Amino acid sequence: MQEHQTIYNAKAYSAASATSPLASSNINRRGPGDRDVQIEILFCGICHSDLHLVRNEWSKVMPTVYEIVGRVTQVGSGVTKYKPGDLAAVGCLVDSDRTCPHCKAGKEQACPNQVLTFNGPDRHLGGVTYGGYSDSIVVDEHFVLRVPSNLNLAGAAPLLCAGITTYSPMRHWGVGKGKKVGVVGLGGLGHMAVKFGRAFGAHVVVFTTSPGKKEDALRLGADEVVVSSNAAEMKKHAGSFDFILDAVSADHDINAYLNLLARDGNLTLVGAPAKPLSVASFALIMGRRSLSGSNIGGIAETQEMLDFCGTHKITADVEVIPIQKVNEAYERVIRSDVKYRFAIDMASLRSE
Ligand code: NAP
């Protein structure tokens, strides 16, 4: 713990082990330092990564994500961008070294010394960072984002993870007018990718394992929907995509999608199944196709994405739940039974 560091007690929900349900608890938070912003958390999204992590499915790697929006309650004396009463948001990162080439390029998501919002090394109090299932959080202002005031706050929370994770690779690979874009898996990430693809002016095709999601996919902005178990429908799209975003959380056949790419097409993985995927080399060699991955986004790009959402009135489709239903919500995420993101209303924690 750093010298002169004050501490306060915050209410939270946490899991004691990979097999325990989340339950009410208390955690230590640091009191705001000079450059810190204290935020009363109003809504926090539930990402599938929360489940991978709480259930220890990613035991060899430890990325995690958080989607927090709230209102500023206190700021340190050196804070210039925020004041009490402002709306503010925090995503997956709360710190980085700020000196490495990635940080200098505004790509903090690649910094080797990044501190994640949950389970990162807490440089102030020691131990680990505790994430967003809590009534408040204290974060250095560099990692605090501004939320456009016209957006619904519950629907804005998932933008901090599902939003930036899909926006960033779509921008990087030039998704726009005249491009044919596939989105695999209509979940929290996938439904945001559909909204962005539409807003960027691309032709969007959704691939789903759930026939019951067809109408939703069209309503969300897809031009076409393919049920991936239908071989004839899949074949019709062979060799035709400029870009495919794969947002599937579980093991699946990635070669079926590589074969749908046009020459020089790219498939970017954002989904993070625990088991390694097997890739057929010929699916890549033929047509100089590429396979890549993408991890959330940097702070500047996250702000750009939030501003884009403000201009285009884009938020996630959310089901708002009290925190007492978080364990039930996890089971429903596993069954793909959520349209399309849970957002926890933190007033339910405050009133416990
Ligand atoms: P989600 O809401 O649970 O959506 C995942 C979707 O994958 C489901 O809705 C389903 O879509 C499809 N799916 C599920 N099981 C499947 C199976 N066995 N075979 C084929 N398709 C299946 O999850 P999410 O929150 O969007 O997260 C998706 C993945 O991205 C997770 O692995 C998460 O950890 C990862 N993630 C990565 C980053 C990053 O920075 N790269 C950031 C956040 C999350 P259909 O019903 O339409 O088939």
Image (spheres, rainbow, N blue to C red):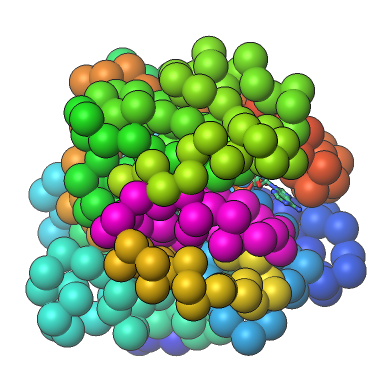
**In-front residue for pair 98/333:** 333
Point out the image quarter for the C terminus.
top right
Name the residue: 49% across, 77% down.
281
Name the residue: 33% across, 62% down.
287
Name the residue: 72% across, 54% down.
13
* Relative to 270, 289 lies left or right: left
Q: Residue 326's spot in the image, x, y percent?
A: 77, 43
Q: Is 96 part of what is drawn in magenta? A: no
Reply above or below: 339 against 302. above
Q: Is residue 84 visible?
A: no
Q: Is residue 202 visible?
A: yes
Reply above or below: 19 against 333. below
Reply above or below: 264 against 95. above
Q: Residue 156's spot in the image, x, y percent?
A: 43, 31
* Relative to 279, 34 lies left or right: left
Name the residue: 15% across, 45% down.
81
Q: Is 248 part of what is drawn in magenta? A: yes
Q: Across the whole image, how many numbered discs are drawn on residues?
A: 0
Report the magenta residues as a range: 245-271
**In-front residue for pair 344/81:** 344
Which quarter of the figure has residue 292? bottom left
